[in-house]
């Protein structure tokens, strides 16, 4: 009985390890589709008013997104976009172009975070400096709370909220209100 069990175990093992897919040596192996990683984030703080968003920002800008590049830190993708400042609506920035760092990239995104800036699109953006180490500036900025992002719509009539999932912040800002800064009052 014991010998029969061992024989069955050996036969099963050989049968499992001896199995292979029936393909010829010359048949090409199709490339695997790259999987897009999903990022899930939780907020330590959410914003319900423009005043709260402004208070936590160092600058509010109106401008145009330029070229972007993808960086990886500790296995997590970030997109850094060159942003041409057309108007400083509040606060200050060191030059006419700033680098905006956002969580995500072509292979990783999240519905919880603001959409990635799109080259050529115009935005109103609330920013604060990005620090890898607290108190040490990197020269890059982040969208405040990942909420302070509004993109000009295709008709040029309003800036639409692009700060991630549902929010209590206004869903849009009229171009008149953005041009005059009225939405900040």
Image (cartoon, helix red, strand yellow):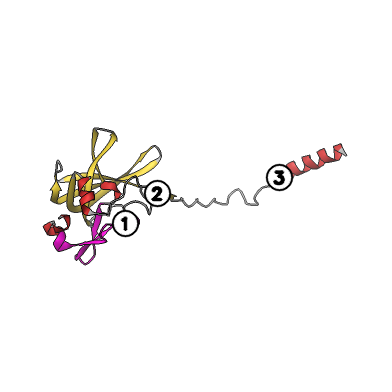
N-terminal label among 2 and 1: 2
For the record, the magenta segment spans 148-177
Identify the residue shown where x is 38% and y is 51%: 110
Identify the residue shown where x is 22% and y is 46%: 127
Q: Which residue is mark 2?
A: 108
Q: Which residue is mark 1?
A: 167
Q: Could you say whether the residue bearing mark 3 is in a helix, strand or loop?
A: helix
N-terminal label among 1 and 3: 3
Figure disc tally: 3
| Left or right of residue 99, residue 40 in this image | right
The disc placed on residue 115 is none
- Which quadrant is home to the N terminus? top right
- Magenta stretch containing residue 129, yes or no? no
Instruction: Please tell me which residue lies in front, 105 or 136.
Output: 136
Spot the residue most to the left. 180
How far is the residue under mark 2 from the one under mark 1? 22 Å
């Amino acid at each position: 009985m014991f010998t029969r069990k061992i024989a069955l175990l050996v036969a099963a093992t050989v049968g499992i390890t001896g199995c292979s897919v029936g393909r010829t040596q010359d048949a090409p192996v199709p490339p695997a589709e790259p999987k897009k990683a999903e990022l899930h984030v939780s907020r330590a703080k959410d914003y319900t008013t423009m005043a709260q968003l402004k208070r936590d920002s160092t600058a509010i800008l109106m401008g145009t997104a330029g070229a972007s590049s993808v960086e990886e830190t500790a296995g997590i993708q970030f997109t850094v976009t060159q942003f041409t400042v057309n108007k400083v609506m509040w606060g200050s920035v060191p030059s006419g172009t700033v680098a905006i760092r956002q969580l995500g990239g072509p292979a990783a995104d999240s519905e919880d975070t603001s959409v990635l800036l799109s080259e050529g699109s115009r935005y109103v953006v609330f920013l604060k400096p990005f620090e890898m180490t607290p108190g040490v500036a990197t020269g890059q900025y982040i969208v405040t709370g990942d909420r302070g992002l509004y993109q000009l719509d295709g008709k040029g009539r309003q800036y639409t909220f692009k700060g991630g999932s549902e929010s209590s912040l206004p869903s849009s800002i009229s171009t008149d209100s953005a041009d005059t800064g009225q939405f900040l009052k």
